[in-house]
Image (spheres, grey):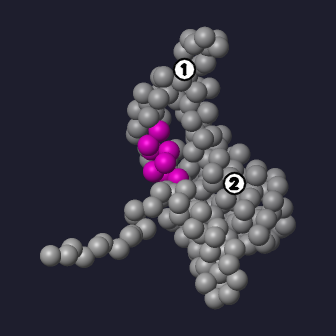
Amino acid sequence: MSRKKRKLKVEDLSTLEMTDILRRLLGKKGEVADVVRAEMERCFSDVDTDAVAADVHVELECLDVEELWNRSGRSRYGYTHPSEAAWEMIEEVLEPHLDRIGDYHETGKKKECDRYTLGVLKGIYDFDKKSRTEFKAQTSPDDAMEGFYIVLEKWKELRPDKDACDWMQQMLEESCPDCPVDVSG
């Protein structure tokens, strides 16, 4: 009695294996590479601001106070203040998002850059206003909003034109109502 073999699924592959397969497919000529490129373009062009905000909020919510305590205090390298350790952890969450903002800009996707940035900013704002995590309770009350202003400044460096700044100002007034932000300044 023969058993039917199960077909491989995406879930069976590691991230490294998926990346390798994607690179090899992109290296091929013809229809397969064109389909992969088109799908990449579609994924990169699809920016759901609310989904980005929710992701950032959840990532910040998942910061662990135990990790904060492990990173702070005395070590063989000196002393790390808890607020310094907290800021490092927040930076680690925001860094990939700052990279993605840069990616959108570098590929000429200005609207996507703007919408993605708005999502990141809204996620930080929501964390600042709504979070009741122990991590947040142990950090400086302004830590998250420092990240907000760093993200906003990076975006303004990339997108200094008046129309983009006016759009962002309007969106932030709607999405982050009690956040004192002057995008043009």
- Mark 1–mark 2 Cα distance, whole angstroms, equals 27 Å
Q: Is residue 160 above or below residue 180?
A: below
Of residue 88 and residue 21, the one placed in the foreground of this image is: 21
Residue position marked by numbered label 2 in the rendering: 99
Across and down, in percent, residue 14 comes to: 47, 57
Across and down, in percent, residue 133 comes to: 41, 38
- Residue 97: image quadrant is bottom right
**Earlier residue among tags 1 and 2:** 1
Residue 42 visible (yes or no): no
Across and down, in percent, residue 99 comes to: 69, 54
Residue position marked by numbered label 1 in the rendering: 72
Magenta stretch prevailing secondary structure: helix
62 inside magenta stretch: yes
Q: Is residue 50 above or below residue 26?
A: above
Element under disc 2:
helix
Q: Which residues are magenta?
A: 56-63
Element under disc 1:
loop
Residue at 62% from the left image edge and 75% from the top image edge: 25
Q: Amino acid at mark 1?
A: Ser
- Residue 47: image quadrant is bottom right
Q: Is residue 29 left or right of residue 74?
A: right
Q: Amino acid at mark 2?
A: Asp
What is the number of the mark on residue 48? none
Residue at 61% from the left image edge and 33% from the top image edge: 88
Q: Is residue 86 left or right of residue 58?
A: right
Furthest residue to the bottom?
31
Furthest residue to the right?
161
Of residue 9 and residue 89, the one placed in the foreground of this image is: 9
31 inside magenta stretch: no
**Mark 2 packing: few (<14 Cα in 10 Å), some, or many (20+)?**
few
Residue at 15% from the left image edge and 76% from the top image edge: 1
